[in-house]
């Protein structure tokens, strides 16, 4: 098969969204040879290294201007199909949610959908993105031959809100990179020194934005401190939008000396940062999958997260799940783990075992099965 994989997110700062196409492309060659084209918009060292490793992976750059009144998605829809129609791909797989499928002529079309946050939480997205999802996204879903979701939660949302036939959707879980594992003390200490983390700490990893529910975390952390816990709270991730209320909450609760913002943490530093934390907290209101809790478990760090959306699918019985709006419940869960070494060790062991259930080779193999199923469609 001649397969085009649209992977624009791989050109940006590596986040969970970029981790998916990178690892998918990395592991696809382990299963049954095909001809793969990585479709993206600028030169990329990661992709260059893949091409050097595998003869049947090809680079296909389609530059897309960043500034536009309608956002990146509308440009993808119009500019990319013109180029792709000339390539005679058997399959086009868009790995980032909003495929340029309406004007594709011959290729079979597969779309990966992570979540429906632009529709479920419109206040957390640009207006243009919300409108695109409200009026254009349904057409893209309809034009797709197959839809891949990263959780049963997202599959359920697609069926509920768009009446997508259940057999058109395939759930394929993501995974933590193999680098996320328990590390030696010297590697952990290097990260402590790099980020000046002298005290024991509680860790959050993710974008600083409303949907991540950081204000609830701050209020729970404030209650925790009142109970005598001395840990710092480390918030690792780039600053998103509508972040001012988060810093206003820190000022109001007088937590400036206790909350440490690292900013964006390079991917290579994350495993040691997870290892260095006493517990990992992820109180997000909604996730299509939620890689950070899985990465933390793979490192042996106890996880406390929300009991909503896909997060129970990821964490299972290996972590503690609480209502994301329950400040007291979150504070209580953190206190219990931090003051009970037996519980902490039990969660560590369960987390390590749980993380083994997810791996990128399995993700790649299941995705390739979808390619073959779609290729053989009449």
Image: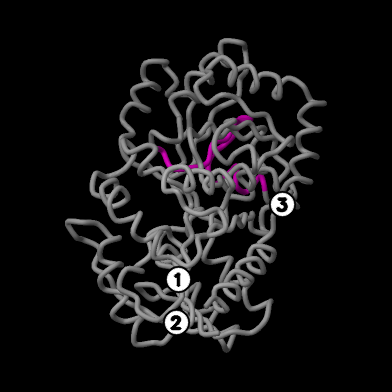
- The verdict on residue 192 being magenta is yes
- Label 1 sits on a secondary structure element that is strand
Q: Which of 336 and 323 is in front in this view?
A: 323
Mark 2: few/some/many CA within 10 Å (<14, 14-19, 20+): some
Q: Please identify the quadrant where the N terminus is shown.
A: bottom right
- Of tags 1 and 2, which is closer to the observer? 1
- Label 3 sits on a secondary structure element that is loop
For label 3, the residue is: 181
- Of tags 1 and 3, which is closer to the observer? 1
Q: Report if the CB atoms under discs 1 and 2 are less than 8 Å apart.
A: no
Please tell me whether residue 121 is drawn above or below residue 101 in the rendered image: above
Mark 1 to mark 2 CA distance (whole Å): 19 Å
Residue that appears at 54% across and 37% down: 309
- The verdict on residue 124 being magenta is no
How many discs appear?
Answer: 3
Residue 367, percent across and down?
60, 67
Mark 3 to mark 2 CA distance (whole Å): 31 Å
Q: Nearer the viewer, residue 127 or 109?
A: 109
Residue 126, percent across and down?
27, 45
Q: Report if the CB atoms under discs 3 and 2 are less than 8 Å apart.
A: no
Mark 1: few/some/many CA within 10 Å (<14, 14-19, 20+): many
- Label 2 sits on a secondary structure element that is strand
Residue that appears at 34% across and 55% down: 137
Residue that appears at 65% across and 32% down: 279
- Of tags 3 and 2, which is closer to the observer? 2
For label 2, the residue is: 59
Residue that appears at 82% across and 26% down: 342
Q: Give the range drawn in magenta.
A: 188-208
* Mark linked to residue 109: 1
For marks 1 and 3, the one nearer the N-term is 1
Mark 1 to mark 3 CA distance (whole Å): 36 Å
């Amino acid at each position: 098969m001649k397969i085009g994989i649209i992977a624009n997110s791989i050109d940006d700062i590596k986040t969970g969204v970029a981790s998916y196409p990178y690892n998918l492309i990395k592991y696809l060659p382990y299963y049954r040879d095909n001809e793969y084209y990585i479709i993206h918009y600028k030169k990329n060292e990661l992709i260059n290294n893949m091409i050097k490793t595998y003869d049947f992976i090809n680079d296909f750059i389609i530059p897309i201007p960043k500034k536009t009144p309608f956002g990146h998605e509308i440009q993808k829809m119009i500019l990319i199909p013109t180029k792709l129609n000339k390539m005679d791909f058997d399959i086009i797989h868009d790995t980032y949610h909003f495929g340029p499928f309406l004007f594709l002529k011959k290729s079979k079309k597969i779309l990966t959908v992570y979540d429906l946050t632009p529709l479920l939480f419109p206040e957390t997205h640009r207006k243009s993105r919300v409108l695109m999802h409200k009026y254009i996204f349904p057409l893209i879903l309809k034009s797709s031959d197959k839809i891949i979701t990263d959780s049963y939660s997202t599959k359920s949302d697609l069926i509920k809100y768009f009446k997508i036939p259940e057999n058109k959707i395939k759930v394929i879980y993501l995974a933590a990179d193999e680098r996320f594992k328990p590390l030696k003390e010297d590697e952990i200490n290097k990260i402590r020194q790099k980020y000046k983390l002298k005290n024991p700490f509680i860790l959050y990893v993710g974008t600083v934005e409303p949907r991540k529910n950081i204000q609830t975390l701050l209020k729970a952390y404030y209650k925790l401190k009142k109970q005598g816990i001395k840990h710092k709270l480390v918030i690792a991730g780039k600053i998103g939008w509508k972040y001012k209320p988060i810093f206003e909450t820190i000022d109001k609760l007088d937590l400036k000396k206790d909350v440490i913002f690292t900013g964006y943490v390079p991917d290579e530093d994350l495993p040691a940062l997870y290892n260095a934390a006493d517990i990992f907290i992820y109180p997000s209101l909604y996730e299509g999958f939620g890689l950070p809790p899985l990465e933390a478990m793979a490192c042996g760090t106890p996880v406390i997260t929300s009991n909503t959306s896909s997060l129970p699918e990821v964490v299972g019985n290996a972590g503690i799940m609480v209502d994301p709006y329950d400040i007291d419940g979150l504070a209580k869960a953190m206190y219990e783990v931090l003051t009970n070494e037996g519980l902490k060790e039990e969660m560590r062991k369960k987390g390590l075992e749980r993380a083994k259930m997810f791996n990128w080779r399995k993700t790649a193999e299941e995705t390739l099965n979808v390619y073959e199923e779609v290729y053989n469609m009449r």
